[in-house]
Image: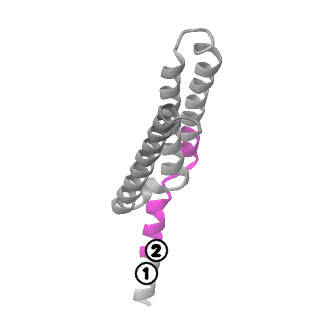
Amino acid sequence: MSELHNEHAHNEHAHGEHAGLDKKKIWQVFGILLAITVIEFIIALWAIPGGHMPQHIGNYVYIALTLLKAFYIVAYFMHLKYEKVGLQVSLTVVFIFIFYFIVLMLIEGGYLHLHMPLV
């Protein structure tokens, strides 16, 4: 009986570690995601067309804001923030390599497009 009680208490403790998203935190993350989206819309509908920000700078800002939104979604709504550090690091390293290879392919594709004659 004691083992069953200890196992049940251990399961409650493990569940409590992952139950870090209460209503307040969900609304806080929602507010952050909403604010980032509003900033993106302001840039797209006012700053770039109005000449307040160049297009190439706007693209970099879009990429940074999108990565920030992706972090919040993965960390809080997919519960990665509450996982062990080893899993977090392994997924982060994989993401960095995928992003790196996509950038390399885009650079290589741009080079080939510019320097290869059309047949």
| Quarter of the C terminus within the rendering | top right
Secondary structure mostly taken by the magenta-highlighted segment of the chain = helix
The residue labelled by disc 1 is: 7
Q: Quadrant of residue 14?
A: bottom left
Q: Residues within 10 Å of mark 1 (few under 14, many from 20)?
A: few
- Residue 42, image x, y percentages: 61, 19
Provide the secondary structure element on which disc 1 rests.
Answer: helix
Residue found 57% across the figure and 34% down from its top? 31
Q: Is residue 40 above or below residue 14?
A: above
As helix, strand or loop, the secondary structure at mark 2 comes to helix
Closest to the observer, 59 or 33: 59
Q: Is residue 47 above or below residue 112?
A: above
Would you say residue 26 sits in the magenta stretch? yes
C-beta proximity under 8 Å, tags 2 and 1: yes
Binning the other alpha carbons within 10 Å of mark 2 as few (below 14), some (14 to 19) or many (20 upward) gives: few
Residue furthest right as drawn: 45
Q: What residue range appears in magenta?
A: 10-28
Q: Which mark is residue 11?
A: 2
Front-lying residue, 56 or 85: 56
User: Of the residues shown, which amino acid type is indicated by label 2?
Assistant: Asn
